Amino acid sequence: MTTGHTKARNSTRKGASLGITPRGRFADLDEDKLRGGYYTSPTVADWLCAWAIQSAGDAVLEPSCGNGVFLEAAVRRLRSLGATPAKIARQLRGVEIIAHEAKAAAERLRSELGKSAEKVVHNSDFFAWWQETDQPAFDAIIGNPPFIRYQSFPEPHRTLAMAIMGEQGLTPNRLTNIWVPFVVAATASLKPGGRLALVLPAEILQVTYAAQLRSYLTDHFERIDVIACNELFFENAEQEVVLLLADGALASASEDNTCQVALTAVQTVAEITEVEPSLVLKQAEPKVIRHDSEKWLKYFLDNRQIAFMRELRDAAITTPMSSYASIDVGVVTGKNEFFVLSSEQVEELGLEGYTTPLVSRSAQLKGSTISKADWQSLAARGDRVHLLNISKAQAGKLSAKLRRYIEEGERKNFHRGYKCSIRDPWYLVPSVWVPDGFAFRQIYDFPRMVLNASGATSTDTIHRIRSHGADPERVIANTYTWLTAASAEIEGRSYGGGVLELEPTEAERLLMPAQLNGAMPLKEVDQLVRAGRLDDVLEENAKIILRGHMGLSVAECNLLKSVWTQMRDRRNSRRRSGRKGAA
């Protein structure tokens, strides 16, 4: 593996943070962070070791030890339990693929273990080491595995990792992040009754590619605790991480295992590290697991809320959005700089007749409806709301001005970008159609859907809604409920910046009334949403739809509202605390 890979490093530097692969803008990050150089603090490592290592005789593994902060914490824990340096050197193992990191890890342990420190650290690919070592062999496994995307994980390490997943009955794909096989192999390395204590991305709670792993873990452990913190752990990164504590490893997997999963949410890192692990975990309410595709994100709710949402999902009074409409991504241009234009640009470049009205940003959708007048207002103020949309018929006879514009794009190498390069010709944008409505892809407060009366399409920052036959206005009017809002928080995935993101398949799972009866008129909804009075709309639709048509009680409506507001407020609190939360 090259030194430029995005492995999460470990360090004892003051104020260090939990390991993470950087996301988003890289321009402001130094070289260390471009490699994924976010650090696990010694206090967090000590806390995890205090939970995972229970006796002086425990055999302990750190499968991705970096420069040794977890190993050093493990030595401190084992010494406190009475283990001698000679014994620790025999029972503690760390694996690290980068030679200079492995050397640094051994050096870190030398003051405690002397020359025996060299025996602890193995400079190897973990997956190759794993296959060559007798398993299971450990009582406790600790650490912070690398967070590397499938495409960025080099061979032959990737093939070895995926083969181990296959041996354990899982089927990886090209979305599988490399931390997943690390968790799988670590689990398979535990003796019966063993413990797993890892720093993992919060994706384990919610993303589809981790669904198999969630089932795998619940088949292999008696109890799993996940600890989330509203204070983000690292600078310049908005991805949330969690602490995974899995207890009571089973001798063999069992789908009949009654694993309990408990989620604990705290505000600050200090609320974790300054309290005994048992006291932190005691406050959590274990949840009853369903062995299906259900996300663990739901387990931030209490058992009453969870049971109610499950009942609604299975009830005859609800149906998924997919019963009424399909939701698809917006137009993928490949180069918005070239294809998305303002009215002034269209006129100056002589591109009249080659464009389609467009909504290019969710901020352009102010209410629950976008009309032609709304679109014209956007165009008049200079927004880029025109899509260059050359038909196949037009491509055979381009105007001189359009040809010059295309040639200018080619001089800038726009045609060499991936999405453009796979098209022939590169400037014909596929899948341009006008939807019945729009659905927000990224959500801060409410999963707003908007009736499209403008004749516009959208870029892929906004999803497109196409009705299966139901009146689009009635469909969209019936989305303005706590029912749809609550299910969005469960079906979507949230990130450290407080954003809830819904992919099309997730949006199609949003709960809707089984019958599209009356709702608050969309014209009135539009006026109130534009005036910032969304809550008034939801209260009125609770009376009309939830209680009137669906027959829910006032208490059930309030329970539904609590699911939405609790989940929404949790992720929004992370958005507010994220900038100051880099420990």
Image (tube, rainbow, N blue to C red):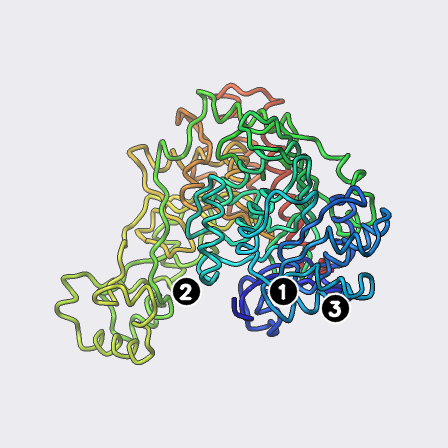
Query: Which residue is the site of mark 3?
Result: 107
Q: Amino acid at mark 3?
A: Glu
Is 277 situated left or right of 8 in this image? right
- Residue 537 visible in the shown view: no
How far apart marks 1 and 2 lie (CA) works out to 30 Å
- Crowd around label 1: few <14 · some 14–19 · many ≥20 (10 Å): some
Residue 383's label in the rendered image is 2
Structural distance between the alpha carbons of marks 3 and 1: 30 Å
Provide the secondary structure element on which disc 2 rests. loop
Pinpoint residue 309: horizontal percent, then vertical percent: 55, 28
Q: Earlier in the sequence, mark 3 or mark 1?
A: 3
In the foreground, 205 or 291 = 291
Q: Is residue 542 above or below residue 148?
A: above
Give residue 261's position: percent from left, percent from top. Answer: 64, 34
Q: Quadrant of the C terminus?
A: bottom right
Residue indicated by mark 1: 236
Label 3: element kind: helix
Q: Earlier in the sequence, mark 1 or mark 2?
A: 1
Whether tag 1 and tag 2 are in contact, CB under 8 A, the answer is no
Q: Quadrant of residue 96?
A: bottom right
Mark 2 belongs to which amino acid?
Answer: Asp
